[in-house]
Image: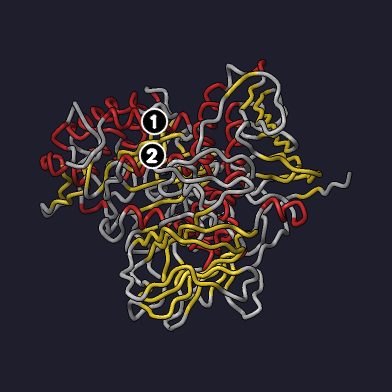
Amino acid sequence: MTVAVCTAAALVLPGLPAADGAAVSTAESVADSAAVAGPPRTVPALRQWTAGSGSYTFTTGSRIVLDPASSAQLADEAATFAEDLGQLEGHSVPVTTGTAGAGDIALSLGDDALPAEGYRLTVAAAITVRAGTAAGAFYGTRTVLQLLHQSATVPAGTALDWPAKAERGLMIDQGRKYFTVAWVKQHIKELAYLKLNYFHFHLSDTFGFRLESSTHPEIVSADHYSKQDIADLVALGRKYHVTIVPEIDTPGHMNPILAAHPELALRNSSGTVDPGFIDLSLPGAYTLIKDLVDEYLPLFPAPYWHIGADEYVDDYSRYPQLLAYARAHYGANATAKDTYYGFVNWSDALVRAGGKTTRMWNDGIKAGDGTIAPNADIVVEYWYDYGLTPQQLAAAGHTVANESWTPTYYVLGGAKPDTRWMYETWTPDLFQGGRTLTDPTKNPGSLLHVWCDNPNAETEDQIAAGIMYPLRGLAQQTWGSPRLTASYASFTPIATAVGHNPAWPGAAQPGNLARNRPTTASSTETADFPVALATDGDGTTRWSSAYADPQWLQVDLGSTRTVNRVVLRWEAAYGKAFRIQLSDDGVTWRTVHSATAGTGGVQDLTGLSGSGRYIRIYGTARGTAWGYSLYEFEVYGDQPGGARTPTASGGAEARPAAGTAPARG
């Protein structure tokens, strides 16, 4: 048997050239090409892959089989995997204990030499996931989901896989923009699908306080999470190995709290009120904040509590009461800034008393402006190069997480991540301003940050679409495995092929013959709207053509298929006149549907009759001044060789086979 050992490097999947220079996707079948080209396509890439001979095929008889020695420890992971796999395949997948047979997926523990989140994946007649911990086994199941998302058949081989960084995830600014519970749940599953494990909830800020409160109901915004909502989200996070870490931002950004307690707002020497700063010279400020910390600490079982502590006072000379407080509490030589540092340590004591570790943003920690310093046990999140450098913070005893503006900040109505630079150049150990640590182990990892400074600038769906590729770039870089391809342009088709988690809205499309198949087009408007996005199964991404007639989009179905239905999901730029055509060779075309008065939206074309290996939409008249733009081009018909058939309820039958410094908060 001949095998190839790969480290997931140097696999390049450029767009396939078309004879006429048309745009082409790279959604080839994994079963057809992966064994030849290199490691399977996953996000993040597998750390090590040894190719074998033969393949695995998922069938209607496939089971999840637990090793009897570890069945109790992996029961939850197996149940979650079965649920997700059932959504992907369109039928329930049984979980049993015993010995795996052909087509089964086996889960076991006992590989204790692997890192905590590592796993060993063996693909043969059966798939085996073996790990040292439940978390490692869980991430092995995410890899299997990604592979089966692309094909029912997976090339044989063995993988060893583990992450470089312990913290990998997402932060959302719920304080400025309320994110629905459904959106948050979707993204817990999405994070897990990408092997991301950390979800930071920024729950209070300028425009809102988003938690139900029994101690201070007067501060709660109309749009908020009940404690039951949080309990449900925490439970879902636990199920998907995603830690939810809360932040109540203090002593700045407290606008919604201080709107209900104006007597605690900080006033300068002229009597002017800053609506976001609480006055730390007042005993009532500490009483209020302690009430909230004590109320919410038990609600979140995560080991961390984030106090915020960013963007408080910048000119302490304007607030003589802070100087007086500092000298009364910290000595005659204290500075006004010591009131801030003292507050940080007071908050840290509250958090530690609750059995947790404090986290804070870095910008308030500077050199030489106080007589006391933040406690060394506090994790500092470095977001911009203000104050002490990451190395200086580490030297002071802090763990320093890299939450740098560049490239992890996604600001509604503002800056967006340079995902190309993130993927091609950046690593989680490169901090804002080019800073580094002499000991990278002091840096637990990085998150993508969604800041909602302009909350109405984007909808939830637009945010989800906007962070799709940045999340995947971050997943790759924080996992730290050798990249499948060096260029971002070649990475995006891989991310598109891997797609979303099985529960993602619209992701199932059971029986869609066009999904992730090689797709070509006459043109693309820009590189932001490539042709592969019309057949990626994601209703939030799209292909757009040039602003001219005629235009076409063509899909290679892989073999001759009978077609009886096509669904066109148009963006605002739609086709008024077009034809649906089939071909055996991609040259000679037969029309099975013709339209001359299309109105856009979702066009569900049923009752078609024809067959061919290739199908295309050929547009002859645009409905607007723009080009043709499709969120999805879906094709349905016969299901030989392992495709899924849509049912009336939308489910599926069984598949038998195959400038100036920023202000960010």
At mark 2, the secondary structure is helix
105 sits to left or right of 662: right
Residue 404 image point, x, y percent: 47, 54
Q: Identify the disc placed on residue 234.
A: 1
Q: Residues within 10 Å of mark 1 (few under 14, many from 20)?
A: many
Quadrant location of the N terminus?
top right
Viewer-side residue, 163 vs 601: 601
| Total numbered circles | 2
Residue 405 image point, x, y percent: 44, 57
Which three-letter amino acid code belongs to the residue tagged 2? Lys
Q: Earlier in the sequence, mark 2 or mark 1?
A: 2
Q: Residues within 10 Å of mark 2 (few under 14, many from 20)?
A: some
Which residue occupies 17% across, 32% down? 284
- Quarter of the image for residue 421 reads bottom right
Which three-letter amino acid code belongs to the residue tagged 1? Val
Are the residues tagged 2 and 1 within 8 Å (C-beta)? no
Q: How is the image coloured?
A: secondary structure
Above or below, 558 against 620 in this view is above
Which residue occupies 16% across, 44% down? 265
Q: Identify the disc placed on residue 272.
A: none
516 sits to left or right of 198: right
Q: Identify the disc placed on residue 185.
A: 2
Nearer to us: label 2 or label 1: 2
